[in-house]
Amino acid sequence: QVQLVESGGGLVQPGGSLRLSCAVSGRFFSIDGVGWYRQAPGKERESVAAIDTGAITTKYADSVKGRFTISRDNVKNVVYLQMNSLKPEDTAVYYCWVVVDVKKVYWGQGTQVTVSS
């Protein structure tokens, strides 16, 4: 079994920053691609960012490019999402996902991010 525990969400003013973390634990041989999705009320789920195994290739939604940075610590098995210059439209529940052992996908429970003055 694999567990993902997210943290770092909260309330922040527009222009502020937050760093989300997703700690992965359990029984697996390898963690492959990892990333973050978000879902705002009344909107479809949106892929925010992803990073490959070697942390070489990253992908971002156009709406967050230049403001968000995804990274990973392959020793601690933690995925991060640094979010800067936050906007009210970034308000959503953020979910991390990981692919382990090549083909098994697991999701976190979600963490709320609210950007408001």
Image (tube, grey):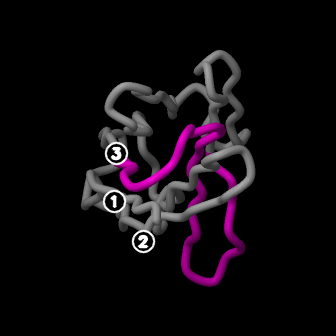
Q: Residues within 10 Å of mark 1 (few under 14, many from 20)?
A: some
Q: Is residue 110 left or right of residue 40?
A: left
Query: From the viewer's perspective, is residue 80 above or below residue 4?
Result: above
Label whose residue precedes the other's in the sequence (3 or 2)? 3
- Residue under pointer 1: 5
Vertically, is 78 above or below 38? above
The part of the image, by quadrant, that contains residue 21 is: top left
Cα separation between marks 1 and 2: 7 Å
Give the magenta range.
21-48
Q: Secondary structure at mark 3?
A: strand
Residue contact at pointers 1 and 2, CB within 8 angstroms: yes
Give 8 or 23, whichever is nearer the viewer: 23
Residue carrying label 3: 21
Q: Which mark is residue 109?
A: 2
Disc 1 or 3, which lies upstream in sequence? 1
Residue 23 colored magenta?
A: yes
Q: Looking at the image, which residue is at 31% across and 43% down?
A: 18
Of mark 1 and mark 2, the one earlier in the sequence is 1
User: Residue 72: x and y, percent?
Assistant: 45, 29
Secondary structure mostly seen in the magenta stretch:
strand
